[in-house]
Structure formats: C-alpha cells, structure tokens
C-alpha cells in the first residue's frame, strides 16, 4: 500500500502541482519553514521528512483526505477519457510537436527563465497538457539558473546567484536499460560536449532538459550552460548549439520523431540543421531537399521587434562553430553561413539564427496582430520583391495559463458562476457571458480581500529589503490600503518606459496624494545583468519610493519572479503598461491581471491594440506614433496623466450607497467577458494546432524509424 509519503512523492514529481493551489497548499502546510522559503519545491520538502515524520505531521489534520483527493485527481488528469487533443490533434499522437525554447518559466522554484518569453513557454506546455496535445518540450538545464535581483544601498541592482539544488528538483535522469544515463554528444570547436537528459513531467507533457553535467565533459564544458543568458557571444552560440543540435539528438535517442518542430524564438534555430542532417542520414536525401523538408515541418515564432533581441554572431565565431555541422551535411561552410545572412553571399555579414529560422520554416508568426505586421515589415528584406503584406509571417496572439495565474478565490467565483466545467470551454466566448449576471458587490468583496493580501505582501517585501540594507523599518508602513492600487511589473528596459509618470513629479505627487482619491503605485522588475540603462531605471523608481513628496504611495519590490508577479496580478486594481509602440510584441502581464479582475491601462501596443474595445479598460493615446521618440514620450506622459486624473481615478472612487464602485465593476466585468476567452493559453495552443502544427505535420516524406 502507498504510504502518505509515497502519495506525496508522486504528487511532487509531476509539475501539475504548480497550477493546483490546493496541492501547493498541502506542501506548504507540511513545510515548517514555508514562510521564509516560499521558493522551495515539494521534493525538497519531502527530502527532509521520513515516513514517520510525515505521518506525525499530518495526524489530526485534514491533510490525509486532501492528499488522497489530490492523488486521485492527478490520476484522473493523467488518464483522461476524452480530450480536445485526442479529437483534434490525434494526428500528432505518434509524432508529437517538439517545442524548443531557451527558457521555461514553470514555477519560481525552477529558475530557468528570465521573463516573458520563458513564462510564455511554460504556459504553452501547461496549456498543451490541459488540452492533451501531443507535445514535448526541449530546453537546457542551467545548473546555476538565472540571476536573482537584490538592490544595494544605492538601490543599484546586484545580480546574485541563489542557491538552487538541481538534485532537489522533480526531474528524472533518463537512463538506458542497463541503468546508465543516456546521453548525446554535440561537437563544439575541438571537442565533444555530452548532454544527459533530465525529464520533467508537466502534467501530461514531458519536458526534456539537457544537462552538461557529465563526467566526460571537462569542467569548463560543464559550465557552458551553467547560466541562462550568461557569458559572452561564444558562450551564447555554444548554448544555442547544445540546445538545437543536442535537442534534436536527444529526441532521436528517445525514439521520438517530431511531426512538427516549433522554435520559440531564434535561440534554438540550429535544430533545423541537425534535423536536416538526420534526414540525410536516414533517408539518403540531398541536403537542399532535406532543408526544404525540414522547413515544411517547422514553425518559428519571433518574439521581438527590438533589433538587439536578435543574436548576431560574427563571421569568424560562426565559422568555428558551424564547420562540423556543414561537413556533416556535405555542404560548403560558406553556404551554411549564408543560411543565416540577409545577403547569403556577403561573407562579412554576421550569422543571425533568426534569419536562418525565418528562411527555413514554412510557417512563421509574430505574437499579436500588430506584431505580425511589424515583423513583416522588419523582415521584408529577406523576401526581396515582395510587399510587406506578402511576407510569409502571420501571427498567433499569446495567451496565459489561467490556472497558474488566477487567485483561488477568483477561480472559485468562475466555477460557481460560469459553469463547473468552464475550464474545458474557456476559449469559447459564450463560456464567459454569465459574468454579466454576477453581482458587482460579490466581485468587489473578493477584490478587497485580494488587495489586502497583495498590500501585505508588498509591505513584507519592503520590510525585508530594508532589514537587509540595515535601514530602519517604515512606520507607518508604505501603501494606503484603501487607495486605488496600480501595478507595474516586468523586465526593466528603456522601451517599456517604467519612468513615463516621472516626467512631472509635482503632478505625480498631486495624483498620488489626492485626498479625494489617493493612488498607490507598486513596481517590480529585473534588468538584464548587462543593461545599465535598465538598472538606472530601477534605481530611479526605488529612490522615488523614498521621496517624501509621494508619502510612501510608491514602492519598488526587489527580486521579481513568478512568485512576486503572481502576488501582484492577483490583488492590484489596475495594471499599467507603457511601452513605446510598437516595441512590445505582445506583453502578457496585463492579461494575468485582467483575468483576476484588474483593469488594464495601456498604450495601444501588442495584445492591447487588438483587445481594447473602448470600454474594457483604458487606452493611453490613440495608437498614433510620432517619429520623434522624445515628442512621443511627452505626449504619452500627458495622455497617461490625463487618463488617470480624468477617467481612472474618478471611476474608481465613484461609489454607491454600499461603497461599491458600480461603474468600475461594470468595466471589470466587461473586461473579463471580452478578453478571458482569447487571452488564455488554451486558445493560443488551439490556434497553433489548427493553423500551424497540423499543416506542418502533414508534409514529411522522410519518416524516421525509431532507433
Ligand atoms: C508575465 C510575466 C512577464 C512578462 O510581462 P510582460 O508584460 O510581457 O512584459 C515577466 N515576468 C514575470 C514574472 C511574469 O509573470
């Protein structure tokens, strides 16, 4: 018979728990230190408890029945009777989608993500799992993860490595029949780097994480993939080769023949070359035909119109690193390098994985309607003679995994008021129509509970930071619990303009301290370790938090990650998004806040350009862009101030006799009803399946036999 500890171990081993708050709560209650160690994962908790200790701890609590229930629900989830994927994506059953990404943001305890791109990848896996779409994720296991942000006394971001123990994670090393770790080799200049395969279960989906920790690698090679986005260009191209080439080899080693290859951003583009090489080896194809076939089965998603977001490898670096692959394909090295150049014969051009991916994927897409159009313009040079609208790049707007981001209380309202099975039909607009019939007071009441929780969280983060910096505690604590509370949390980078409101500090002070309608601003976000401008923006915000003019209505929370993000999305009244249009390809943090009942205040960029309907949130400006960025900055700031002063604040503070802001709540309901069905990961994954994966999976002439 399974002991309680066995049951808990089974639950801990599948990352399904990351989107089941009631299962997270079980582990939380078992963990004596849970308050100070929120990032701990259940495997680590269980490591410290033997069977007797578990039994001791759960005695005379309701945990045994909750554990039994969770255990049964996991079994049911893993053995579904019928699913969307079974019916609509059955063609992918024997040949699944291979989804490659340099980062995956699944939970705060696995720090192999930096921001939006990784979290999107995590949400994509979870959505595919819920729908039961045959898909396997491929990524790198960064043993030191991504840097953690702490501020120093000058409020300058320090990038520290947090202790993070891979052996405590719910990963299983894949082994052969004899119990030896399976591994694949990837040629880097002058040596072979071996990769072991660590497997994570994400509900019904598997995620393969390639691990350089093999005794046959010298210590430097064990470090190549130690840190996400760590190191210089050389480290970068080596990581990308390990991911793309190693990933395709790992799939083959496991007997998985992909029906379609989905490259989430250009970091994994080298998978294209390795897949073509495999087709040549197995089916005797010539290299150009193999590349054409691979293109037919490849889906490429580009995520940024920011020029610097696309790798450019200098010719000599690319030559050193692609020589072996070129030889393996029987191609001239210059021809292979040409695949990643805008002008293939210009040997002075750098090699761009994005260019190679765009040329060798029959299906490419941006991540919102507007970004699709921007990407067509941006990459028109690759299709000389075509007009922008004829460039073969479409779009699938991003979505977010609702179960991951919803507050349990909001989840419960949806279950009670929409339908008990709303999650199975969340991508249908009609699922959300009953929102209109919910009493605004009911949602308002829950929003107040959530806001109190978020403010408590923010205060404790600030207190902890001040203690670490040896600053005196704040008395009274920051943030007015009754005030309209606006959140802004995302990567700090100039184009996102966290400083838009700082163009007029007196006006800002008047807005925040307005006795008839005070406002709180909660900021959080990391800058890339090498981005001094981003760090300067953080410093500016953190210093303003200390400026007495703002009366502690501004806070900056350090250490932004999934945990901090979740706390903010769930409890703020409104979410602020101020990118310089059209630099925000999609943006997803606003979706997470909106689903929890916040209103979105945003420039008409990314997803907001297609979701805003005039009444479901607030638009800053009208989408027009001035050629001079400084003029644009001034205009956007003016528009934002006016919007907050004349529309947002009055709407929030206009209350009925019960103290409920009825009109505000009407907007909240409209916002959820018009956006929830399209902003979720199920809708996104369904679009990928119907428009991209299934057509891509039909083309292959070369069927790869299992090894
Ligand atoms: C959703 C999310 C992001 C992405 O935010 P954008 O609005 O797309 O910039 C970044 N970090 C975390 C922790 C998130 O949850």
Image: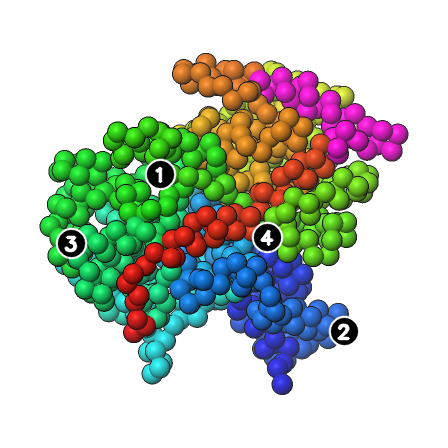
Q: CA distance from mark 4 to mark 2?
A: 30 Å
Q: What residue would you read off at disc 3?
A: 326
Q: Looking at the image, is mark 4 or mark 2 earlier in the sequence? A: 2
Q: What secondary structure predominates along the stretch shown in magenta? A: helix
Q: CA distance from mark 1 to mark 4?
A: 33 Å
Quarter of the rendering occupied by the C terminus:
bottom left
Q: Quadrant of residue 629?
A: top left
Give the SS element for disc 3.
helix
Q: What residue would you read off at disc 2?
A: 60
Q: Residue at x 56, y 51 (%)?
A: 682
Place of residue 593 in the rendered image (x, y in percent of width and height, measured from the top left): 62, 40
Quarter of the rendering occupied by the N terminus:
bottom right
Q: Residue at x 51, y 22 (%)?
A: 623
Q: Looking at the image, is mark 1 or mark 3 earlier in the sequence? A: 3
Was residue 157 drawn as part of the magenta stretch in this picture?
no
Q: What residue would you read off at disc 1?
A: 392
Place of residue 418 in the rendered image (x, y in percent of width and height, measured from the top left): 74, 49
Place of residue 475 in the rendered image (x, y in percent of width and height, measured from the top left): 68, 35
Was residue 644 drawn as part of the magenta stretch in this picture?
yes
- Quick check: marks 2 and 1 in contact, CB under 8 Å? no
- Quick check: marks 3 and 4 in contact, CB under 8 Å? no
Q: Name the side, left or right, on which 49 lies relative to 219.
A: right
Q: Residues within 10 Å of mark 1 (few under 14, many from 20)?
A: many
- Quick check: marks 1 and 4 in contact, CB under 8 Å? no
Q: Establish if 281 lies above or below 322.
A: below
Q: Looking at the image, is mark 3 or mark 4 earlier in the sequence? A: 3
Q: Residue at x 65, y 43 (%)?
A: 429
Q: Residue at x 42, y 35 (%)?
A: 372
Q: What residue would you read off at disc 4?
A: 404
Viewer-nearest of discs 2 and 1: 1
Give the SS element for disc 4.
helix
Q: Which residues are magenta?
A: 639-666
């Amino acid at each position: 018979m399974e002991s309680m500890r066995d049951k808990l171990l089974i639950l801990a081993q599948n990352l399904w728990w990351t989107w089941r708050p009631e299962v997270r709560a079980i582990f939380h209650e078992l963990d004596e230190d849970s308050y100070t160690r929120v990032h701990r994962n259940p495997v680590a908790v269980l490591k410290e408890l033997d069977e007797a200790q578990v039994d001791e701890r759960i005695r005379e609590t309701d945990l045994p029945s909750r554990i039994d229930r969770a255990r049964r629900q996991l079994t049911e989830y893993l053995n579904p009777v019928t699913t969307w994927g079974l019916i609509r994506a059955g063609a992918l059953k024997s040949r699944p989608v291979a989804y490659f990404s340099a980062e995956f943001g699944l939970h705060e305890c696995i720090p192999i993500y930096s921001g939006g791109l990784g979290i999107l990848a995590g949400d994509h896996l979870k959505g595919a799992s819920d729908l039961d779409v045959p898909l396997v994720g491929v990524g790198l296991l960064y043993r030191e993860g991504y840097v953690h942000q702490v501020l120093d006394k000058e409020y300058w971001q320090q990038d520290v490595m947090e202790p993070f123990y891979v052996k405590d994670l719910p990963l299983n090393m894949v082994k052969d029949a004899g119990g030896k770790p399976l591994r694949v080799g990837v040629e880097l200049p002058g040596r072979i780097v071996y990769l072991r395969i660590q497997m994570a279960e994400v509900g019904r989906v598997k995620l393969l994480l390639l691990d350089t920790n093999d005794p046959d690698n010298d210590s430097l090679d064990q470090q190549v993939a130690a840190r996400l986005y760590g190191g210089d260009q050389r480290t970068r191209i080596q990581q990308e080769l390990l991911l793309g080439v190693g990933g395709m080899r790992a799939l083959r080693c496991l007997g998985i023949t992909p029906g379609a290859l989905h490259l989430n951003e250009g970091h994994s583009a080298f998978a294209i070359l390795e897949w073509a090489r495999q087709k040549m080896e197995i089916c005797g194809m010539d290299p150009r035909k193999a590349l054409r076939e691979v293109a037919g089965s490849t889906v490429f998603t580009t995520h940024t119109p920011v020029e610097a977001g696309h790798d450019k490898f200098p010719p000599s670096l690319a030559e050193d690193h692609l020589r072996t692959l070129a030889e393996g394909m029987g191609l001239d090295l210059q021809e292979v390098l040409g695949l990643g150049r805008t002008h293939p014969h210009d040997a002075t051009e750098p090699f761009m994985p994005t260019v190679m991916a765009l040329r060798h994927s029959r299906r490419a897409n941006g991540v919102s309607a507007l970004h699709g159009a921007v990407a067509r313009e941006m990459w028109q040079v690759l299709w000389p003679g075509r007009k922008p609208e004829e460039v073969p790049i479409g779009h699938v707007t991003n979505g977010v995994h609702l179960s991951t981001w919803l507050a349990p209380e909001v989840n419960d309202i949806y279950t009670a008021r929409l339908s008990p099975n709303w999650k199975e039909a969340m991508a249908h607009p009609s699922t959300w129509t009953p929102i209109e019939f919910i009493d605004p007071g009911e949602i308002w009441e829950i929003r107040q509970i959530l806001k109190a929780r978020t403010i408590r969280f923010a205060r404790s983060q600030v207190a902890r930071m001040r203690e670490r910096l040896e600053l005196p505690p704040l008395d009274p604590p920051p943030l007015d619990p009754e005030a309209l509370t606006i959140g802004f949390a995302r990567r700090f980078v100039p184009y996102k303009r966290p400083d838009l409101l700082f163009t007029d500090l007196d006006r800002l002070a008047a807005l925040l301290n307005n006795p008839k309608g005070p406002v709180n601003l909660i900021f959080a976000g990391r800058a890339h370790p090498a981005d001094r401008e981003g760090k300067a923006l953080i410093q500016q915000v953190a210093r303003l938090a200390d400026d007495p003019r703002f009366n502690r209505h501004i806070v900056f929370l350090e250490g932004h990650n999934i945990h901090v993000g979740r706390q903010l999305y769930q409890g703020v009244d409104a979410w602020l998004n101020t990118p310089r249009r059209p630099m925000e390809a999609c943006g997803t943090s606003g979706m997470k806040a909106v689903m929890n009942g916040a209103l979105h205040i945003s420039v008409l960029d990314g997803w907001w350009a297609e979701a805003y309907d005039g009444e479901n949130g607030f638009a800053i400006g009208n989408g027009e862009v001035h050629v001079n960025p400084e003029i644009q900055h001034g205009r956007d700031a003016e528009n934002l101030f006016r919007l907050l002063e004349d529309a947002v604040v009055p709407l929030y503070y206009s209350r009925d006799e019960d103290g409920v802001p009825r009109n505000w709540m009407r907007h909240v309901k409209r916002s959820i009803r018009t956006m929830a069905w399209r902003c979720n990961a199920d809708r996104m994954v369904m679009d990928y399946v119907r428009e991209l994966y299934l057509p891509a999976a039909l083309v292959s002439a070369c069927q790869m036999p299992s090894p």
